[in-house]
Amino acid sequence: MKNFLVIFFIFPAFFSQAQIICIFCFDQNDSISQNISNSIVNGSFESHTCIPNSYTNSFCPNSNYYSGNINGWTCTGGGPSTYSNIVDGGFTTIPEGTYGVYFGNGMCNACSPTQFDTSCLVQSSCRVAGVPLGFPVNAFAGYGNALGVSLEQTVTGLSPGQSYVLEFWAGGEGDSTTFFFLDDGIFAVDIGFGNIYFRCKPTLPFPIRTGTRFIIEFSATSASHTVKFTNWGHMCLHCTELILDDVRLYPLAELSPSVPSCSNLPTVDFYSVQNLCPGTCTDFTNLSLNTTSCQWYFAGAIPDTSTDINPSNICYPNAGSYDVQLIATNANGSDTLLLTNYITVYPSPSPQAISQNGDTLFAITGSTSYQWYFNTNIIIGATDYFYVATASGDYNVVATDVNGCEVEAAVFNVLANAQSLVNGQWSLYPNPVSNKLIIQIPIAIGIQVTSETALDISIYNLLGEMVLAVHLPTAYCLLPTCSIDVSNLSSGIYYLEVSAQNIFRNKFVKQ
């Protein structure tokens, strides 16, 4: 074994202690452990029926170029345009034997629908963190979409509860005569516990370039585990695609003693809901191992730091994207994980208000969904932007926007079975009004208006708040009109309610 250099190890996100134990990566081409009992069949990919280095000869059955198979391995995913094939040392560095596997599969979007956007990716020791849900995904039709292209093999004969090692070499294409690949690509490994994301770097054959050796220690949960490698394509113009070689799976007891023990150092990881509405709070789940103390940093949050193992009620008042950092420590050292823009707080939804016309209450349109309440109790089935009031009392509506964020509006003292002021010759003028609002009283609308009659006049704003109340005997009016002073009201839209023997309402605008 030559050039043995450990560069990182980490326990990856979203895995329990009973599954992934730890991950190491090594800046070398040579194998890590010697004289192992490999459970992988044809891990060096020497046995196949493919034509090497040919884009028109693929080992993927879903490809239009499908022409051969790799003994012991099954290709899944991909699409009619997938050009994954067998390559030799003229195409890239091959650390074991003559051949390796090239996951040729077009272009992919790693972080967003924007092509070549890699801003979400965080190199967290050996692995890659920050990949959003639903990504990576192929940028063009015909390459397997979100599935990408995968090569997998099911290993049997494992002992549940026992620890094993998956070791493999990862490199990348690099043919400077046609297209020079300078940047690392992205790929995933799944051994039954979900995708773990890694980077693969270009490995030009001339001169021989160094790839990466990976070690994944895990605890078997059944007698068989499927080992699956996936690539979605070039994530940037000069980013390579995966080339895989020398896949080995063996008991932990056969691991080289040069590899450090997983049990001594802390390994940091955490999880939280990542998309929030303004003013809401979230809890953080600590997935770190071998940790005695924690220091959290929450940019933009209240509180913005914590030493709790699992911080709760971390609140984000303002819209934006925010970093989260955790430093996990024990007596042997510390490990740090910083996830840039990990928390996204959506913009505040548009304000809501309730207007009324007769018995019908109206919310502002444009929200994704609505729910009406009467006297704080939910009204089953009242999910439109309007609601016909069937009982007198207080009403409120909760409107939800496309991000799932809610905003509420209320109106108080709604009287059911109310008529509009414009019915029966009631009217308001001038409208808009500056100072004096004139109420035109009908001569005969089923009530008797005399000098002994009193009008109870209430004015509400769009939030349903009463801003003016007047008890006005008609003796002080110049029948058939009465006037009220609204000069102290702020500019805006208001609702006037007149109570005589019946209830009448209408809307006016204050200039």
Image: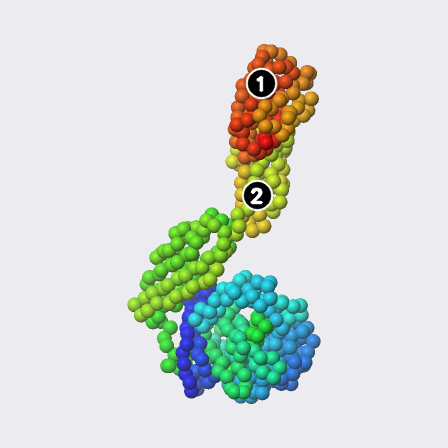
- Which residue lies at the image location 54% right of the left edge and 19% below the top edge? 471
Q: Position of residue 100 (x, y in %)?
A: 56, 83
- Residue 140 seen in the figure: yes
3D distance between C-alphas at marks 1 and 2: 36 Å
* Residue toward you, 424 or 230: 424
- Which residue lies at the image location 48% right of the left edge and 82% below the top edge? 210
Quadrant of the image for the N terminus? bottom left
* Residue toward you, 486 or 2: 486
Amino acid carrying label 1: it is Leu
Q: Position of residue 257 (x, y in %)?
A: 37, 81
Tell which circle, 1 or 2, labels the residue nearer the N-terminal end. 2
Look at discs 1 and 2 and give the one toward the viewer: 1
Q: Are marks 1 and 2 in contact (CB under 8 Å)?
A: no
Crowding around mark 1 (Cα neighbors within 10 Å: few <14, some 14 to 19, many 20+) is: some
* Residue toward you, 310 or 204: 204
* Residue toward you, 26 or 79: 26
How many discs mark residues in the rendered view?
2
Q: Which residue is mark 1?
A: 455
- Which residue lies at the image location 36% right of the left edge and 64% below the top edge? 328
Secondary structure under tag 1 reads strand
Q: Position of residue 443 (x, y in %)?
A: 68, 16
Q: Which residue is mark 2?
A: 399
Amino acid carrying label 2: it is Ala
Query: By what rule are the colours in the image chosen?
Result: rainbow
- Which residue lies at the image location 54% right of the left edge and 45% below the top edge? 406
